[in-house]
Image (tube, rainbow, N blue to C red):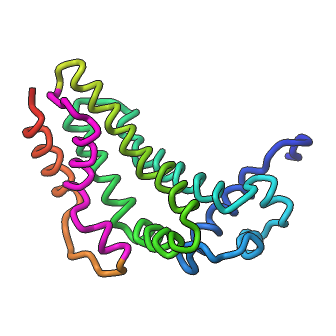
């Protein structure tokens, strides 16, 4: 089916984001926009029409990851189910191979392109924390949990789930074997016990 004039071909957008993610992981922030276009198999004009800069690409990548991580907060359910699912997703997205490569890419990029690293943090990890904090504040409001400082509690939850997983990812150190589902469920239970009403 032919595209209507002005309609965006989303497959090209996805190809650009996939290429950028791979190249950022491999080379850090020094990668050129031309290299991203070549890897994605698109013209420079197509790349710049969708993403005028690496900053915008970084924001888009981080926003996509934040949406995936915070999906359990939107899906609803009882607090234990939501937090267990969120913990499992965090472990998959951050401790998994893709997450480790992404974190290394941002770490490589940050000295050379601090504005891109900040944009990635704001659109990704910071936004995920903001969403978790808002969810925790709502649980506090309804009396399901007692969370007087949802921002601090959101950071505590992420720290409990990930432990040193994110640091191992940045450093490229292998993560010791663990059972994702058991860790996710135990973290959710312990967190809920700490913030029980």
Image location of residue 164, percent across then percent down: 24, 68
Image location of residue 165, percent across then percent down: 28, 67
**Left or right: 49 as drawn, with respect to 36:** right
Nearer to me, 171 or 2? 171
Span of residues in magenta: 145-170
Q: Dominant secondary structure of the magenta stretch?
A: helix
**Left or right: 43 as drawn, with respect to 16:** right
**Left or right: 76 as drawn, with respect to 144:** right
Query: Which quadrant is the C terminus positioned in?
Result: top left
Q: Residue at x 65, y 54 (%)?
A: 56
Q: Quadrant of residue 33?
A: bottom right
**In the rendered image of this protein, does residue 96 appear above or below residue 77?**
below
Q: Residue at x 17, y 24 (%)?
A: 144
**In the rendered image of this protein, does residue 79 appear above or below residue 97?**
above
Report how many numbered discs are placed on residues in the image: 0
Q: Residue at x 12, y 43 (%)?
A: 189
């Amino acid at each position: 089916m032919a595209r209507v004039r002005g309609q965006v071909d989303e497959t090209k957008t996805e190809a650009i984001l996939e290429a950028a993610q791979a190249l950022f992981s491999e080379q850090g922030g020094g990668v050129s926009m031309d290299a991203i276009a070549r890897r994605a198999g698109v013209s420079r004009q197509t790349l710049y029409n969708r993403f005028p800069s690496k900053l915008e690409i970084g924001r888009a990548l981080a926003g996509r990851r934040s949406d995936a991580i915070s999906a359990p907060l939107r899906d609803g359910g009882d607090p234990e189910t939501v937090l267990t699912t969120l913990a499992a997703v965090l472990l998959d997205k951050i401790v998994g191979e893709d997450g480790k490569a992404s974190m290394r890419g941002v770490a490589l990029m940050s000295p050379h392109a601090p504005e891109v690293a900040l944009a990635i943090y704001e659109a990704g990890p910071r936004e995920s924390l903001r969403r978790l904090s808002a969810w925790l504040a709502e649980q506090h409001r309804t009396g399901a949990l007692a969370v007087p400082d949802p921002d601090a509690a959101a950071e505590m939850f992420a720290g409990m789930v990930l432990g040193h997983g994110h640091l191992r990812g940045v450093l490229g150190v292998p993560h010791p074997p663990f059972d994702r589902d058991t860790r996710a469920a135990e973290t959710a239970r312990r967190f809920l016990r700490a913030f029980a009403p």
